[in-house]
Amino acid sequence: MTRPRPGALFALASVIIVLDQATKQLVVSTMVEGESIPVLDGILHWTFVRNPGAAFSLFTNLPWLFTILATGISIIIAVSARKPRSAGSAVALGLVLGGAVGNLVDRVIREPAVFRGHVIDFIDLRVWPTFNIADSAVVVGCALLIVASIREERAARHLEAAP
């Protein structure tokens, strides 16, 4: 079985970063912070929120910590991505990398200060904290990484058991 090429992983990450930043820029340029626009009333709203913390607005007083964590995660993925083990793990890592860098861009360039910027969130499902495309990519990527790891482990065990 051939290994996936790392270029595909970085291409996917790039697409996530561009989509994430483009949608955030659209929100910032067309909405007022705190504004909520119903898309499917009661189900999906675009709600402009600036998040200084982590997921679910946890640890709002430590934005610099998330800058460091996102940078570290991005570096680890970029280094390990040179030899992805499977297409599934390459897609998963591409999503996580794109999401981490998408939110890292916010932490570096957005208000209130460099490396302490607030992440722009806008997807509001009304039953879940508001999030963005980068957040979605990280969550889906982590889930896919778990699935890919389980599949790779099963395949390895199957090869070991073969005569």
Image (tube, rainbow, N blue to C red):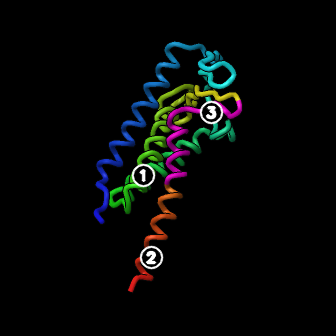
Q: Secondary structure at mark 2?
A: helix
Label 3, on which residue?
52
Earlier sequence position, callout 2 versus callout 1: 1
Q: Tell me the quarter of the picture where residue 152 sits.
A: bottom left
Main SS, magenta region, reads: helix
Query: What residue is rendered at 31% in x and 48% in y?
Result: 8
Work out whether residue 81 or residue 72 is closer to the camera in this orientation and state it.
81
User: Is residue 51 placed above or below 38 in the rendered structure?
Assistant: below
- Under mark 2, the amino acid is His
Residues at badges 2 and 3 in contact (C-beta under 8 Å)? no
Residue range (magenta): 127-144
Residue in the image at 42% along x and 52% along y: 75
Residue corresponding to mark 1: 75
Residue appearing at x 48%, y 70% in the figure: 154
Q: CA distance from mark 2 to mark 1?
A: 32 Å
Disc 2 vs disc 1: which is toward the camera? 2
SS label for mark 3 = loop
Foreground pick, 41 / 46: 41
